[in-house]
Amino acid sequence: MHRRDRINQANSTAAFMAAIALVLAGGLMAWTGCEAPEEPADPEAAVTEAPADEEAEAAPEDRELFIHAGNSMRPAAEALAAEFEERYDIGVRLNFGGSADLLSSIELGQRGDLYLPHDPYAEMLDEKGLLERYEVVGHITPIIIVPQGNPDGIETMEELATRDLQIAVPDARYATAGQLIAEAFEGMGLKDEFEANVAMEGRGHNEVAMALVSGHVDAAMVWSFIATSYKDRVDMITPPDADFPEKRVTLCLLTHAQDHDAAEKFMELATSETGQAIFEELGYKIASGD
């Protein structure tokens, strides 16, 4: 046999042996792979679930009470929210704004659990079919504030119009208190005199109070709760010659409340001894019989 023929025969034999090895290896792999893995006794046992106690701890972080609150109610709303979160471990989101603007937002968006305005917005909410129920939690009324010591000896509303004084008041175009004050002076027949003494009209009550505190005016009129918040820098006078209708502060449960249980808890807190102490301390006058 020629050398070339021996080489070709050897190559053919090697190729044949390699093919057999591949076939045997493939068969072994197929035989090994055909055996299915052992199924767990309980098909659901393979699913990893969080322990029940971990789920209970995580829930409060996701739970949030949504409250619309008029700007005039901000101090009370913030104090109540802090107390509520500490007591129940439920978050509170506060949405502040003008009461009329908030009413429109509630009607259009159908969002939120509670609404904290003053009169007459609970009734307006009810007329729109958005009120489940409400609680009266306080009252606010316009009051005179003067620099500490009352250097001008002011005692009545009439003096604010008839004496040579500069006064600051809420703008009646934006503030309910401003409307009440203007109507009171008109009822006293002192509308022109009052307007002549108005040196500043503020859209916000804090602007009006700061005009007095900074010495730009001699006296001002604001909601009672604003007067209380500045009690260390002003003297407060309840005018004896003005019979202002007290405006109720109402906490309204919305018909579309998403967390009804949390909303009820907040209402219970607001009407409790603790909640009423907060309203009283912050200058929201509490009246009986409502």
Image (cartoon, grey):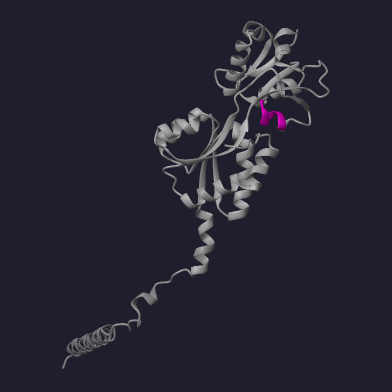
Question: In terms of depth relative to the viewer, which is nearer, 54 or 128?
Answer: 128
Residue at horizontal 24%, vertical 88%? 24
Question: In terms of depth relative to the viewer, which is nearer, 113 or 105?
Answer: 113
Describe residue 249's horizontal placement relative to residue 15 as left or right.
Answer: right
Is 224 magenta? The answer is yes
* Quarter location, residue 240: top right
Q: Where is residue 139? Give x, y as percent.
A: 61, 33
Position of 135 relative to 5 (above/below): above
Q: Is residue 34 visible?
A: yes
Residue numbers of the magenta segment: 223-228
Residue at horizontal 64%, vertical 27%? 141
Which of the image's four quarters has the N terminus?
bottom left
Position of 186 relative to 139 (above/below): above
Residue at horizontal 41%, vertical 39%? 110
Question: In terms of depth relative to the viewer, which is nearer, 224 or 78?
Answer: 224
Describe residue 261's horizontal placement relative to residue 86 as left or right.
Answer: left
